Amino acid sequence: MTYIRVIAAMMMGLGLTACGSVDTATRNAPLEPHVARALAPVSVKVTGYTVTAPDSLRVSEANMYYPLGDVVWREDAPGNRLRQIEDIFKTAFKRGAEGVDGAVPVVANIEITRFHALTEKARYTIGGVHSLKFKMTLTDPQTGAVVVPTRLIEADLEAYGGAKAIYHENHGITQKVRITDHMAKVFHKELTDPTPPEAQKVAQIIP
């Protein structure tokens, strides 16, 4: 599935819509094979995965309500924050990929672009949002060819603050636990419905 094919599908869809008002036969005609292929979801089976937090990501250790940076993470001991968030994503992905057993074998290539959890100051006062973004590309395990093109996925999660944060911490529900559980669900959804957004838009255009 390629962007060129998707664009072609969109053009075909617009053409069908425009002709519909004057040509009923054209409107009701079946889609061309290449259009149908562009719209078809890919049923995948994960045979491997990679998770990368590039060294170019800016890590902030500032204890502010909203520090500048791409990575804000405090629940692990001081250390390499990029490797720490990679480990969180790996755990979540393995859990999310469980039970995904489709027809097309793929390798999931994940690149973290933002991991903004709460600082101590925000955690114990106002709370906020865990801002989580990543890119995912599904490739053929044998050839490396792209099966599902790269998508930027935003997976924000409410971040507890104040008394609510303390209550959950006392019951073992830390930021890491919540983020890992949430990301596992996000990964599972993305793997069971890996249709590129462009193809989803085409599906809305073509009657």
Image: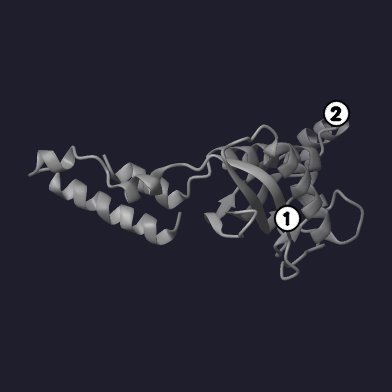
Q: What is the three-letter code of the residue carrying label 2?
A: His
User: In the visual, does 120 lie left or right of 97?
Assistant: right
Q: Residue at x 63, y 35 (%)?
A: 101
Q: Mark 2 Cα within 10 Å, few/some/many (few <14, many 20+)?
A: few
User: In the visual, does 175 lie left or right of 111?
Assistant: right
- Judging by the rendered image, the residue that carries numbered circle 2 is 171
- Viewer-proximal residue among 36 and 94: 36
- Judging by the rendered image, the residue that carries numbered circle 1 is 51
Quarter of the image where the N terminus is located:
bottom left
Residue 120 placement (x, y as % from top left): 82, 50
Marks 1/2: CA–CA distance: 30 Å
Q: Earlier in the sequence, mark 1 or mark 2?
A: 1
Quarter of the image where the C terminus is located:
top left
Q: Mark 1 Cα within 10 Å, few/some/many (few <14, many 20+)?
A: many
Residue 199 placement (x, y as % from top left): 41, 49
Q: Residue at x 85, y 48 (%)?
A: 75
User: In the visual, does 95 lie left or right of 75?
Assistant: left
